[in-house]
Image (spheres, rainbow, N blue to C red):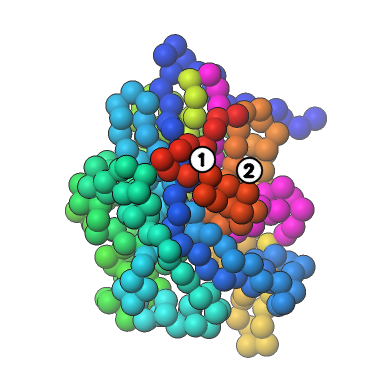
Amino acid sequence: MATEITLPQPGPDQAYLDVSALEAGHLRVTLDTILADALPSDVQIFPSLAFSLRHSKSGSQVVFDLGIRRDIEGYPPAVHDRIDRFQFEPSVKQSVSESLDKGGISPEDVDIVVLSHLHWDHVGDPTPFTKATFVVGGECQDILTSGYPINPGSLISSSSVPIDRTRFITPSDFSTSIGPFPGAFDYFGDGSMYIIDAPGHLPGHVTLLARTSSDGSWILLGGDAAHEFRLVTGEKEIAYRVDALGHVMCSHVNKEQAAETIRRIGLLLNVPKVQVLIAHDYVWYEANKGGPAFLPGAIPPL
């Protein structure tokens, strides 16, 4: 018999977070790079979603991921090469900072920026967030210290986060287990928001699990743990192949770890009152764009 997955019940006067989607740019993706049985002709325009969260008691303003930066020229040369090679064709009609401003929140008033990982379509432009503490997985530290321009060929800019205002979540911080996840960090210490260790895609990758009501609703913001929602449901498998030169072609640095992370996220689909949203969910985006799920509105709790 499968083990039943549960999440902690709310306590008295339980704190929670209001969660809103943010426009954060788009990119073109050929699905055969992420789905095992897709064809090179299968192309989708992916959103690169970011999220605004507000703590119900303290009023702390949190942002999860920063999407794509408007000034594409600000990325390292290797990123430009990658964008051209994979024909991502990034577009930014509204950056995260612009989405916040439009929704009534100044980037200068954001207290915490959590980055799922350090890829170009998630780090955006950190400069408008002048007072925020940045939060990333601990393994990001080594990537940053060897990033561009220290390593001219790196895909990661060493200025992706302001180091003097960055908290690196270490293995010892991931000391709590919650639901299907063995490594979690209760950020506010009140059971309202957990940073989840979510290995596989890139070293330091994390997801965010937040309560969305005082009576037991939750949302999992998955970043790039999975690039397409049918991976979460189990309908599809991760693309993985080796080319004629022996180069591994996979959207994750560790396919086995990524598959296990995706499996654990998928277990949440059977838990009542839990939503799962990944950064590039184009189906969800098409159903909700321009609607009340985006700031200044909020994603309704289940």
Q: Is residue 217 above or below residue 252?
A: above
Q: Residue at x 70, y 28 (%)?
A: 4
- Furthest toward the bottom, the residue is 245
- The residue located at (32%, 81%) in the rendering is 152
Quarter occupied by the N terminus:
top right
Q: CA distance from mark 1 to mark 2?
A: 29 Å
Q: Label 1's element?
A: loop
The residue type indicated by label 2 comes to: Arg
Q: Nearer the viewer, residue 194 or 272?
A: 272
Query: Counting other residues with Cα less than 10 Å from the Cα at mark 1, is it few (<14), some (14-19), or many (20 or more)?
Result: some
Q: Is residue 140 left or right of residue 292?
A: left
**Which secondary structure class fits the magenta region best?**
loop
Q: Would you name the residue on which mark 2 appears?
A: 264
Please state the extent of the stretch shown in magenta in the rendering. 215-237
Evaluate whether residue 28 shows in this view: yes
Give the labeled residue for mark 1: 292
Q: What amino acid type is highlighted by mark number 1?
A: Pro
